[in-house]
Image (tube, helix red, strand yellow):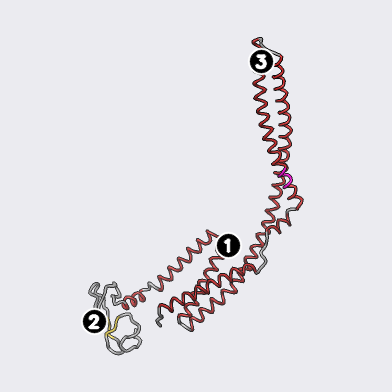
């Protein structure tokens, strides 16, 4: 049965609207089972006191790091001044021009350097101690979070399985029912339902593969699906018998595709026999047609 262009457009719109509504419904099914929250598992494995200690140590670490950098800078400056005054005073002694003022400046620079060095050492010890404590607590929390993540991952895998089961409960009956309807009613409406259910089922499979394997899995699935599609097209669409019938319907030679006229008995391009006598009515009918166009009877093999 032939259908008008407007009917085909409306059928396509019918499929599109059904598909959009169904995909939206499938998305809503994600919220039916309780989705696990990693924070719940983190609280289960990581004590609140440990988290508070980490926060406290992190604040102290940042504070002492600033003090450490400042003390290091002050020590560098005090050392430069001390070396300069020491050399200045030494040269003055060697030349006999040493004064009490130069000596006092040298001693003051030495005192400031020693104070800066002691301050730097004290701050550095405190800074390194806090850094060590923070590293230890970070390592411990990392181990505990890994345990929490492993349990969360199992719970999330169970959640995804439940969601997939719900989606299959919705999609599979539609998919099977559409093919049963198509088997019984071979019209544009049944074809539209088959197209809709097939696209919906394919969407569900692609989504499941992506969530499970992501890029690698989707690539493998796409490669397999493409190979199957090519095999099916090659088998169904490019089957020799179907190619022959398609060329005959286009007034072409079934063997080479050369344009022919209705009264040709042989192809002028390749010489293939184009017609044979119908054993029911005796008329010359095109080769490879199942039914005779003159009497309508099934051709005898």
- In this picture, is 171 found above or below 279? above
- In this picture, is 144 found above or below 228? above
Which tag, 3 or 1, sits closer to the chain's start? Answer: 3
The image quadrant of residue 131 is top right
Farthest right residue?
49
Does 245 sit left or right of 204 as displayed? Answer: left
Farthest front residue?
101
At 33% from the left edge and 81% from the top edge, which residue is drawn?
289
Q: Residue 283: which numbered mark, if any? A: none
Spatial separation of the CA atoms under disc 2 and disc 3: 125 Å
**Figure quadrant of the N terminus:** bottom left
Please tell me which residue lies in front, 50 or 272.
Answer: 50
- Judged by depth in the image, the label closer to the viewer, 3 or 1, is 3
- Where is residue 174 drawn, in percent x and y? 55, 77
**Dot 1 corresponds to which residue?**
212
- Where is residue 221 drawn, in percent x and y? 51, 64
**Dot 3 corresponds to which residue?**
90
């Amino acid at each position: 049965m032939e259908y008008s262009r407007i009917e085909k457009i409306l059928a396509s719109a019918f499929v599109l609207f059904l598909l959009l509504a169904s995909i939206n419904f499938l998305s809503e099914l994600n919220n039916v089972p309780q989705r696990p929250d990693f924070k719940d598992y983190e609280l289960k494995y990581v004590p609140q006191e440990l988290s508070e200690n980490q926060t406290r140590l992190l604040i102290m670490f940042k504070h002492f790091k600033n003090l450490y950098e400042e003390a290091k800078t002050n020590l560098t400056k005090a050392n430069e001044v001390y070396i300069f005054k020491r050399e200045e005073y030494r040269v003055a002694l060697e030349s006999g021009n040493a004064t009490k003022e130069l000596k006092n400046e040298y001693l003051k620079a030495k005192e400031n350097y020693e104070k800066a060095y002691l301050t730097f050492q004290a701050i550095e010890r405190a800074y390194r101690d806090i850094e060590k404590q923070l590293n230890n607590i970070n390592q411990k929390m990392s181990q505990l979070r890994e345990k929490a993540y492993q349990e969360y991952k199992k719970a999330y895998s169970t959640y995804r399985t439940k969601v997939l089961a719900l989606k299959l409960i919705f999609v599979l009956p539609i998919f099977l029912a559409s093919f049963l309807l198509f088997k019984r009613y071979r019209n544009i409406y049944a074809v539209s339902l088959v197209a809709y259910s097939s696209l919906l089922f394919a969407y569900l499979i692609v989504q499941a593969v992506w969530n499970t394997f992501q890029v690698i899995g989707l690539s493998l699935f796409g490669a397999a699906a493409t190979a199957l599609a090519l095999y099916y097209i090659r088998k169904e669409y490019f089957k020799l018998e179907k190619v022959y019938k398609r060329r005959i319907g286009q007034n072409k030679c079934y063997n080479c595709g050369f344009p022919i006229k209705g009264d040709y008995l042989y192809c002028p391009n390749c010489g293939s026999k184009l017609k044979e006598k119908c054993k029911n009515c005796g008329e010359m009918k095109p080769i490879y047609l199942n039914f005779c166009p003159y009497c309508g009877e099934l051709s005898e093999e």
